Structures are given as structure tokens and as C-alpha cells.
Amino acid sequence: MRIIGIFVAASLFTVLFSQANVQVSSQNEQKNAPLKNSNTDTSKPDDSLPTIRTSVREVHLIFTVTDKEGHYLKNLTQNDFKLLDDHKPPEEVSSFRSETDLPLQIGLLIDTSESVKERFEFEQQAAIEFLKETIRPGYDRAFVMGFDASPKVVQDFTDDPQKLSAGVHQLRLGSLTAMYDAVYEACKQKLLTQPQAGPVRHAIVLLSDGNDNASSVSLARTIDMAQRAEVSVFTISTSLTRSGGPGFKNLEKLAEATGGRSYVPMRLAGVTTAFAAIQEGLRCQYAVSYKPAAFTPNGHYRSIDLEVKTQRGLRVHCRKGYRSLESPFSPGQ
């Protein structure tokens, strides 16, 4: 009996030891196997698509609100708004705040084509005054770009209003108008690549009659690039007609899609008034950060719909959407 008991005990020990080895081996195989992230697409993304750059799938949106008379509102709260991203409420709103003192990175783009000849000097002076009153040395930065048949930066990013003024004075009249190329290049080469230590307000102030006859990129591609760079485009029509002329629709679409505003001065003095309104708008804004629901990094265009739900007659100015990829910016795009 003792021999049989010893044999049974030995057999049981062998079975248990074998099972333990199988479990340890299985654990080691799992530990040594490559990690798989179910939310990450391991295939190479299509870098030819405009994207929003994010590593945590969080969208940062800066916007303004105006009443029926065009006055900016500063005292609204998160509960006053309804936000939809790709037609769905966000998964989480991580922050909401009123911003009156964000650092500014501004591109001043001035049409130097033949069509603005009669108003050119006045517009130069109005632009210089705007820069002097808006740019705070050591805090804000701006650059100056002129464009006719092609865009040209006459003063790169600086916080020195005197250098910016000198850049405006360097502008010379040309011939054709490549407005879309100018906005596209300003967003892609300047504002999208400019380093920043924290939240920054990106804006373009565009003086033009809106008639484009020389660009290599379309209005749609220009809007895509501005949205990707999170740039608000503020436009001032130089046609000085009540309707803004035939090119005003182009200026209006640029501003509307990017969260800026469009102005149509009917007199030269109205250009100065428009600059003053833009300056106010750059200091009266809200900032919200949120995680979109059902986010997939597949290049899909996600619309942004933001409205005030507690009061009628108020208008929200924000970019209208973005493309969702987690790939970095491609210089060749």
C-alpha cells in the first residue's frame, strides 16, 4: 500500500509540475510578444491629407461670439453653449475659459496688385497703426506679406512694431492677384510651423478685393490649410463698394470657415474702423478643449458645430471642422 501511495503522489506531483510549466511558459510568451495598441493604425498614414495634429486626441478651439450689432460678448459660460463634433457631443470637455490676453501670432497679408493702386498708401498707413496698437513687444509676434502674382514676406516674425512698419513700407505694387496662394503659404510655412510654449491665438488679417486670378491652389485647399493651422482669417475688402465687389464672396467664405470675420468698408476711413474691430476681436475670445467622441485617425473630415443655446440672436465665430489623422506634418504637402 505504501508503494502504491508513493506512486500516486509522484504522479500527481508530475501533473501539477507540468501544468505550472505550461502556465509560466504561456505568461513568458505573452510578456515577450510585441504590444498591440487597438487604437493605433500600424499602416502608414496618407500625408497628403490636411490633418489636425494631436497625440491625445484632444481638440483645442478658440472662438468669439457677437450679438446682432456685431459687438463681442465676454461673459458667457460653458453651459450657454451646445457643441457637436462630427454631429456628436464630445466625449469629454477638459477645459472652458474666457480668454482676453492670449499671445498673438499674426500674419498681415496685403494685396499689392494693380487693382488696389488708388487706395494703397492709405491702407499701408492703416495697417501700420493696427500693428503698433496690437503687437505687444515681448508677448505678441507678427509678420508682413505682400502678394500680387506671388506672395512675398517683407518682414518675418518679430515683436518689434518699428520693423513691422518698415516692412509695410517696403511693399510695392505689382500686377496679378494670387490671394489663395498667399493665405495658403502664410498658414503652411509660417503659422503652422511657428514654435509656441503654450496656448496662442493664430490669425491672418487679409486686405484684398478678393479677386484671385493667379493662384495655384484653390479656395477649398486654402480653407483646409487654415483650419489645420488653427488660423482665424479676418478679411477687409478693398473694393469700397456696398456689396464688397465680385470678390467679396471669396473673402466671406475664408472668414466664415476659419472663425474670423469679414469687413466691407464703404469709405477709406472704414478701413481703420475694421482694423479696430479686429483688434478687439483678438482680445475677446473663448477657448475650449475637448475629446471628440468616436474619434478614429482615418483622415475623415469632422465638422464642428458650436452655437449659443441660451440666448437668441448671438453668432459664434469658429472654424468649421478639421481632418482627423495622427500623422505629423509633411513638408511636401
Image: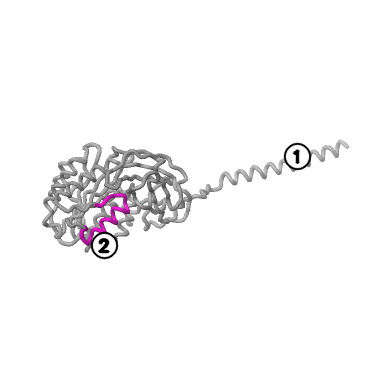
Q: Secondary structure at mark 1?
A: helix
Q: What distance separates the C-alpha of mark 1 from that of mark 2?
A: 79 Å
Q: Which residue carries the number 1 mark?
A: 13
Rendered residue at 42%/56% (across/down):
300
Q: Position of residue 250 (x, y in %)?
A: 26, 59
In the rendered view of the protein, which quadrant contains the C terminus?
A: bottom left
Rendered residue at 22%/63% (across/down):
213
Q: Secondary structure at mark 2?
A: loop
**Display colour scheme:** one colour
Report the disc number at residue 216.
2
Q: Is residue 250 magenta?
A: yes
Rendered residue at 21%/53% (across/down):
264
Q: Most extreme residue toward the bottom, as rendered?
A: 213
Q: Position of residue 210 (x, y in %)?
A: 22, 58
Cβ atoms under marks 1 and 2 closer than 8 Å: no
- Vertical comparison of 5 with 190: above or below: above
Q: In the rendered structure, which amino acid carries the disc numbered 2? A: Ser
Q: Depth check: give the residue in front, 12 or 233.
A: 233
Report the disc number at residue 307.
none
Per the rendered image, the range of residues in magenta is: 243-262
Q: Position of residue 83 (x, y in %)?
A: 41, 47
In the rendered view of the protein, which quadrant contains the N terminus?
A: top right
Crowd tier of the residue under label 2, counting other residues whose Cα lies within 10 Å: few below 14, some 14–19, many 20 or above = few
Rendered residue at 85%/38% (across/down):
3
- Vertical comparison of 261 with 102: above or below: below
